[in-house]
Image (tube, grey):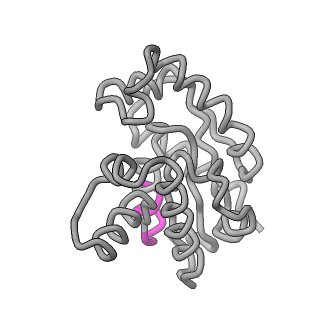
Amino acid sequence: MAERLTRPLLFFGIKHCGKSTLGRLTAEHFGVKFVDTDLELESRFQMLNGCPLPTRDIFRELGEEGFRRFEAETVEALAAQQAGPRVVALGGGVPANPFVEPEVLKKMGFGVYLAIRPEIAFERVRRRGLPPFLASFADPYAEFLRMNRQREAAYRSYADLTFPIEREEAASAVAEKLIQIILTELKP
């Protein structure tokens, strides 16, 4: 008999820690819906403004405070849905977003903090191009480390499970390990 997911999972962590990739693989394993809040944010922006923009451009368009408010509204709308078991990947800044009510995230599901080593995550970020919130700094790596340290307390406060990622591995192998730990943690 296949394992069933009995409650929603909420994946979070620093940019490029694997939230979307591991979230999709985990959702596929359990046969449940996968939701990426960045994609939800883009869809909501297009619906309200009539133009499609990627998350990076929405950030530029709204500025940091406007973006964080819009992000919070998007997360609250997602939390209000009675969706049953699913896997949700939060944008990297959501747990530390001052406009997101802590109760909203707590009620969204079992929190899985993907605690990747920052140097691994930054290398992934660098390969894909620096986002606006890092590109403007003289030392983007130092800013990335500072941001990670600042957000880590929020990540830990929402974590029901902290999953360390210590080295680069195939996503399927990492997902397999993570799924086994989730199954152990969620057993009645």
Q: Where 38 falls versus 96 (above or below)? A: below
Q: How many numbered marks, from 0 up?
A: 0
Residue 5: give x, y in percent of width and height. Answer: 58, 70
- The region drawn magenta spans 25-33
Give me the residue at 36% from left, 61% from top. Answer: 39
Q: Which image quadrant for residue 188?
A: bottom right
Give me the residue at 50% from left, 61% from top. Answer: 71
Q: Where 4 falls versus 15 (above or below)? A: below
Question: Which of these two is toward me, 134 or 80?
Answer: 134
Whether the magenta-drawn stretch holds residue 164 is answered as no
**51 left or right of 131?**
left
Whether the magenta-drawn stretch holds residue 32 is answered as yes
Q: Which image quadrant for residue 105?
A: bottom right
Residue 26: give x, y in percent of width and height. Answer: 47, 57
Residue 115: give x, y in percent of width and height. Answer: 61, 35
**183 left or right of 46?**
right
**149 left or right of 30?**
right
**Residue extending furthest toward the left:** 51
Give me the residue at 62% from left, 52% from top. Answer: 97
Give me the residue at 60% from left, 69% from top. Answer: 8
**88 left or right of 46?**
right
Q: Where 117 falls versus 17 (above or below)? A: above
Q: Where 107 falls versus 177 (above or below)? A: below
Question: Which of these two is toward me, 99 or 2?
Answer: 99
Prevailing secondary structure of the magenta residues: helix
Residue 107: give x, y in percent of width and height. Answer: 70, 71
